[in-house]
Every structure is written in structure tokens, then in C-alpha cells.
């Protein structure tokens, strides 16, 4: 569904993506992990066209996205930090997004309902807690029923119940054949949701494997331990 070829990005002298070659298919949840600053958000934003890569290509359904931005309608994006017009009320935000999108796809208001956001529609965005803002971002990402979801640290700041609701929604999207790319720092959560793990390290893919592969190759039952083992093995190789 999505493929990158030799994606490179510099911010000034900082070489943030060093030729990332990868692909993502429908019906899977891919967890992108790696230390802070390893390039996860930059990779995601490049795929979304929010960051322009210096080199390389991105294909969506085998089409080079360079000259045609329409692929973005197929992606629902939940940013790491959602920023919204401060004085806009939550309800206005949802109506504005619907107006802007004029999408013909059926709306998916499941998350909006499960998070009970309607009860807060008259609240200005600036008055919302971080967690509630995250719920709004998540509900918006799923609203237009996109076939790809890109979620940047979606559960950071969510309360436990909201996290469970979102995780269930992610698994449901996967069962419907959608592609979900999600960054996270929480190993238990990665283990619950992901089929594959992409480990980014200093702008390169360190490994990109299924959870099963990681566990069998290392002989470790716990994902966190399996990853630690691979990291130390490679460091000593
Ligand atoms: P991650 O999401 O893995 O924590 P990022 O992709 O956000 O990492 O950032 C990778 C590196 O690029 C970091 O060193 C970060 O400070 C830098 N960076 C990210 N965005 C910008 C930007 N717009 N301008 C300058 N440096 C940036
Ligand atoms: Mg990030």
C-alpha cells in the first residue's frame, strides 16, 4: 500500500533520515519504535507530505505521490501533538473538518461517540485537557473512514479506558484490511497490537520484523527482552 525508496531528510546539518527503504501493506498494524530523535515523526510526516524529503520516492498504491497529493485523502493522521484553533469550539471543529473534506465516504463516528465527545462540543479547544485533545485527534483521524491510519504516539496522555477504546479501534481497522502505522514507547501496548515492528535508529531501519520472528530468533518470550537482545547482539557484531 505504501512504499518508500531511499528516503533522505536533513534538517540543516542534521541527517535525520538516511535512506529509508520500506513498505507497508493493508491488514496489518506496524509499530514504529526507536529512541527519541531517531526520526519516527519525520518518517511519518514525509509519508504524509508534511515534510518534504530531500531525496527518495514515496509510492502509494504503486503510484509516485510526488505530483499528486490526492493520496492523502486515504490517510487519517493523528499527530503527536494536535494543535487546533484555540477559540474554536469542539463541535465547530468537527463540522469544519466535515465541510472541508466534503468526503463521499461514510463517516465513522464510532470513536467520537465512544469518547463521548459530543457532551463537550460547546467547549473551546483551548480549555480542553491534553487527554481530551488527544481524543479529538484520534476521533478525527478515523472520521473519514480512511484505508490508512497513521498514529503518532496515540495513547500518550490518554487515560486507561480511552487507551483501551483506541486499541480496540485499531485492531478493528486492521481486521477491515486497513493499514495502521503507529509509533509508541510502550512495549506492552506494541505487543498487544502490532504485527510488525520497525525499529528506527539514527535515521536507519535497524530491523523490521514480525513479533513472532523477534521472539523465535531471540528465544525470548517477552518482546522488550527480545528487542534488547537484538540490540546488544548487533552492537557486538
Ligand atoms: P522522533 O519522532 O523519533 O522522536 P523526530 O523525527 O521528531 O524524532 O526528530 C528527529 C530529529 O530531527 C531530532 O533530532 C529532531 O530534533 C530533529 N527535527 C525534527 N523536526 C525538525 C525541524 N522541523 N527542524 C529541525 N530539526 C528537526
Ligand atoms: Mg516523534
Image: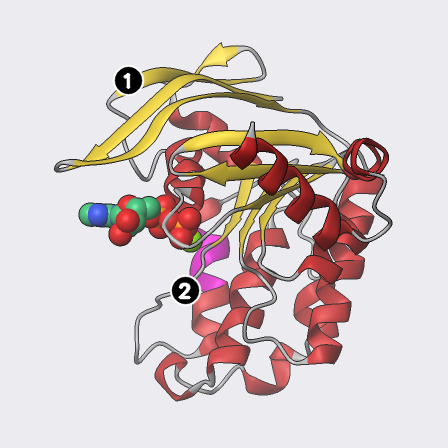
Nearer to me, 1 or 152: 152
Nearer to me, 214 or 120: 214
The location of residue 120, given as percent across then percent down, is 56, 85
Residue 67, visible in the rendered structure:
no
Q: Nearer the viewer, mark 2 or mark 1?
A: 1
Nearer to me, 9 or 234: 234
Asked whether, in this view, residue 183 is left or right of residue 193, the answer is left
- Residue matched to label 2: 82
The location of residue 134, given as percent across then percent down, is 52, 70
Is residue 122 positioned above or below 149 on the image?
below
Label annotation for residue 55:
1
Q: Is residue 137 magenta?
A: no
Snapshot quadrant of residue 188? bottom right
Is residue 82 positioned above or below 68 on the image?
below
Q: Could you tell me how far apart the alpha carbons at marks 2 and 1 are, in whole angstroms?
A: 28 Å
Q: Is mark 2 within 8 Å of ligand 2?
A: no
In magenta, the rendered stretch is 95-100
Circle 1 crowding by C-alpha within 10 Å: few under 14, some 14–19, many from 20: some
Image point (48%, 86%), residue name = 122
* First in sequence: mark 2 vs mark 1: 1
The location of residue 99, given as percent across then percent down, is 45, 53
Image point (59%, 41%), residue name = 231
Question: Which residue reaches farthest front?
Answer: 236
SS at badge 2:
loop
Asked whether, in this view, residue 225 is left or right of residue 133, the answer is right
Amino acid at each position: 500500500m505504501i512504499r518508500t525508496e531511499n528516503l533522505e531528510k536533513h534538517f540543516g546539518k542534521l541527517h535525520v533520515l538516511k535512506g529509508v527503504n520500506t513498505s507497508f501493506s493493508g491488514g496489518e498494524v506496524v509499530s514504529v519504535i526507536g529512541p527519541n530523535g531517531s526520526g519516527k515523526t519525520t518518517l511519518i510526516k514525509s509519508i504524509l507530505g508534511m515534510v518534504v524529503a530531500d531525496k527518495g520516492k514515496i509510492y502509494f498504491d504503486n503510484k509516485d505521490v510526488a505530483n499528486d497529493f490526492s493520496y492523502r485523502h486515504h490517510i487519517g493522521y493523528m499527530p503527536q501533538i494536535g494543535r487546533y484553533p484555540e477559540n474554536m469550539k469542539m463541535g465547530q471543529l468537527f463540522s469544519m473538518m466535515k465541510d472541508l473534506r466534503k468526503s463521499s465516504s461514510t463517516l465513522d463516528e464510532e470513536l467520537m461517540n465512544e469518547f463521548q465527545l459530543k457532551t463537550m462540543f460547546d467547549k473551546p479547544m483551548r480549555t480542553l485537557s491534553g487527554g481530551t485533545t488527544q481524543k479529538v485527534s484520534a476521533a478525527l483521524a478515523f472520521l473519514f473512514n480512511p484505508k490508512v491510519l497513521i498514529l503518532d504516539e496515540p495513547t500518550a496522555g490518554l487515560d486507561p479506558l480511552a487507551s483501551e477504546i483506541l486499541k480496540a479501534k485499531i485492531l478493528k481497522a486492521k481486521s477491515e484490511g486497513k493499514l495502521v502505522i503507529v509509533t509508541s514507547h510502550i512495549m506492552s501496548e506494541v505487543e498487544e497490537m502490532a504485527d510488525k515492528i520497525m525499529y528506527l535508529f539514527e535515521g536507519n531501519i535497524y530491523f523490521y520484523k514480525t513479533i513472532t520472528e523477534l521472539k523465535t530468533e531471540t528465544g525470548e518470550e517477552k518482546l522488550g527482552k527480545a528487542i534488547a537482545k537484538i540490540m546488544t547482539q548487533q552492537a557486538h557484531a
